[in-house]
């Protein structure tokens, strides 16, 4: 059981006062996920072997690595007020639930974008499509995402905390999910008419699709796990979470065009291929000359990436990233949280926004 054994033979009590690598924390979350998923798969396998295979594919997508940022931010949000003496074991199911929710979002996002790979592996709809055709692949991917969301609810409910605390945690979790869905809808909507989109609206998408459920709400989720609602801490987490979360998405916009697929695990140029109106591309259109603007509408993906760079939009996005991180760190500087948690959150702001993947 997750209470006894962790991936890599790490014990829950070994979650340390650790630096930004968070090795023990990540292993603890992944051990909790693995222990939770094993009986879930067995239950479906007992109904029909094909369901067992379906569930194992879902498990493999959950366990396929990734940065584990959401449980990490939630843990340090909790640790900031619970302190080093807090019961980390008790919050592990809640942290694992965030990773299951994230898999739900990724699987559906990949389907909507028709992305071929994620974390260097085929996406869910491509895995199933290779077996029984494109339509089957799309249907199975929807169900994989749905299953992960149900699993997230189940694992969250196993968090051994007082009912009143779990009610507050659940309120944050529900708000996180609603904002993620809202942001995803706006993201899809923007692709239907990118010419009428704007930088401001692209930032609204970034704030709701990514920032709120990557940084802002996980931090607040962690605060609720600690059984407190200190308004000063909540406000510091809100500003830090919003600004660092937006910077995270802005970095993602740059990586989506200029990242190395061998490092990111995703094809380069997907946003250019689909015409997704990201902040980067909206800035490029605003800053382009008439000739560049015309070529942006007709050129191939490689040339489009060159034109975007020529407009100066990537440098402007880098400035926006730096400004947002600075604002977030300023908000965190005087927050009444544990010193070590503040130090780690400062490091995480850099890790999340200056990453190569």
Image: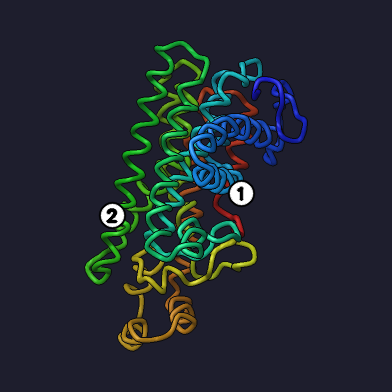
| Up-down relation of residue 90 to residue 39 (above or below) | above
> Looking at the image, do the residues carrying marks 2 and 1 touch, with CB atoms under 8 Å apart?
no
Crowding near the residue tagged with mark 2, few <14, some 14–19, many ≥20 C-alpha atoms within 10 Å? some
Disc number at residue 163? none
Q: Residue at x 60, y 49 (%)?
A: 66
- Which residue carries the number 2 mark? 186
Q: Nearer the viewer, residue 92 or 259?
A: 92
Q: Nearer the viewer, residue 123 or 312?
A: 123
Q: Quadrant of the N terminus?
A: top right
- Which residue carries the number 1 mark? 64
Q: Can you give x and y, in whole percent of width and height, for residue 289 in the image?
A: 34, 83
| Up-down relation of residue 268 to residue 143 (above or below) | below
| Up-down relation of residue 286 to residue 68 (above or below) | below
Q: With 189 as the anchor, is 154 left or right in this view? A: right
Q: Residue at x 37, y 36 (%)?
A: 176
Q: Can you give x and y, in whole percent of width and height, for residue 228 in the image?
A: 45, 16
Q: What SS does tag 1 mark?
A: loop
> Coloured how?
rainbow
């Amino acid at each position: 059981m997750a209470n006894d054994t962790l991936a890599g033979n790490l014990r829950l009590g070994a979650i340390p006062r650790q630096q930004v690598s968070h090795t023990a924390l990540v292993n603890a979350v992944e051990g909790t996920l693995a222990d939770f998923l094993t009986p879930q798969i067995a239950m479906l396998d007992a109904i029909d072997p094909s369901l067992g295979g379906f569930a194992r594919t879902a498990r493999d997508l959950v366990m396929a690595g990734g940065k584990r940022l959401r449980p990490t931010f939630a843990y340090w949000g909790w640790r900031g007020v619970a302190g080093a003496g807090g019961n980390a074991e008790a919050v592990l199911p809640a942290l694992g639930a965030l990773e299951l929710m994230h898999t739900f979002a990724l699987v559906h996002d990949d389907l909507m974008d028709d992305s071929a790979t994620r974390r260097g592996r085929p996406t869910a709809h491509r895995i199933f499509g290779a077996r029984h055709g494109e339509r089957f692949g799309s249907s199975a991917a929807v169900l994989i995402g749905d299953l992960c969301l149900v699993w997230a609810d189940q694992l969250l409910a196993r968090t051994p905390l007082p009912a009143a605390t779990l009610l507050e945690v659940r309120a944050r979790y529900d708000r996180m999910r609603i904002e993620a869905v809202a942001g995803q809808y706006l993201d899809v909507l923007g692709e239907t008419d990118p010419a009428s989109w704007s930088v401001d609206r692209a930032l609204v998408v970034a704030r709701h699709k990514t920032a709120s459920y990557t940084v802002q709400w996980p931090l607040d989720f962690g605060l609720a796990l600690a059984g407190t609602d200190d308004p000063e801490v909540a406000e510091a987490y809100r500003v830090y979470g919003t600004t660092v979360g937006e910077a995270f998405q802005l970095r993602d916009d740059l990586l989506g065009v200029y990242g190395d697929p061998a490092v990111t695990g995703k094809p380069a140029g997907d946003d250019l291929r689909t015409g997704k109106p990201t902040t980067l591309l909206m800035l490029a259109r605003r800053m382009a000359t008439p000739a560049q603007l015309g070529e942006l509408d007709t050129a191939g993906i490689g040339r489009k990436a060159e034109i975007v760079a020529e407009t100066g939009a990537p440098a402007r996005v880098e400035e926006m990233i730096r400004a947002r991180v600075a604002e977030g760190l300023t908000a965190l500087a005087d927050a009444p949280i544990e010193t070590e948690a503040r130090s780690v959150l400062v490091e995480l702001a850099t890790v999340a926004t200056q990453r190569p993947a």
